[in-house]
Amino acid sequence: MSEEFDDDAELVAELDEALASEDAPEDCMQLSELDGFLTGLAVSPVTVDPDEWLSWVWGEGFADKKLEVHVAEMVMDHYARIVEDLAEGYGVDPLLWENADGTADASEWADGFMAAVDLRPEEWLPILDDDTARLHLVPILALACDAEGAPLLQLPPADLKHIQEDVESLIPKAVEEIHGYWTAREDD
């Protein structure tokens, strides 16, 4: 049975602590990347079984299996909250790191989102083939990087700066539009 958390802040704080602890695997996603990953899964055109994607969260897994089970429960709880918020029309409030100057940094969040897309890339092709809908992915693609650290989408510096400065509003709007796109396709 999953532990009940009084609010999202309590869950997020404990999850962040567990993912950043010395007990976490070296290749474990950190909180912002995990939030992007779970959001990508929540808006995915197909459901991906947690048994498949949990290994993406922490690679080889925790040495302490009891801790791994607890972290998995927290991850599933956070994922369920994202799905529920989207279904109820609340949108998302991405968990982003803060730069030294106080601005939000969504690069790890975007990397996590794109890792979710990478689980079923062929299923995402319809949104990429739609001239209007693919624009919803622009802020995420512009902030995400490939394995070598290069941006997935090259933009003129002024456009990238605009996205970086407005990331706290652009990312939730992009997720809302992507979710709406797939929901409308289901209704057809």
Image (cartoon, rainbow, N blue to C red):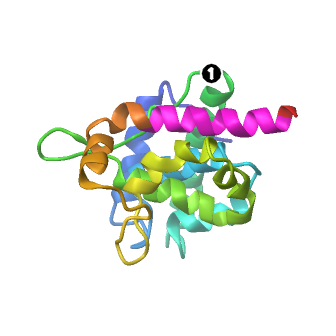
Q: Residue at x 64, y 43 (%)?
A: 42
Type of the residue with mark 1: Gly
Q: Residue at x 35, y 34 (%)?
A: 168
Q: Residue at x 58, y 49 (%)?
A: 40
In the rendered image, the vertical position of residue 101 relative to residue 27, given as above or below = above
Q: Give percent across and percent down for residue 35.
A: 48, 47
Question: Disc 1 marks which residue?
Answer: 89
Which of the 4 image quarters holds residue 77? top right
In the rendered image, the vertical position of residue 53 relative to residue 172, given as above or below = below
Which one is nearer the viewer's eye here, 159 or 98?
A: 159
Give the residues in magenta: 171-186
In the rendered image, the vertical position of residue 155 relative to residue 35, given as above or below = below
Residue 112 on the magenta segment: no
17 relative to 84 in the view: left or right: left
The secondary structure that most of the magenta stretch takes on is helix
Q: Residue at x 73, y 40 (%)?
A: 182
Residue 182 on the magenta segment: yes
Which one is nearer the viewer's eye here, 176 or 108?
A: 176
Query: Dot 1, how many residues are within 10 Å of its Cα: few (below 14), some (14-19), or many (20+)?
Result: few
Q: Can you see residue 180? A: yes
Which of the 4 image quarters holds residue 171? top left
Secondary structure of the residue carrying tag 1 is loop
Q: Can you see residue 33? A: no
Q: Give percent across and percent down for residue 69.
A: 59, 57
Which one is nearer the viewer's eye here, 82 or 21?
A: 82
The quadrant of the image that shows the N terminus is top right
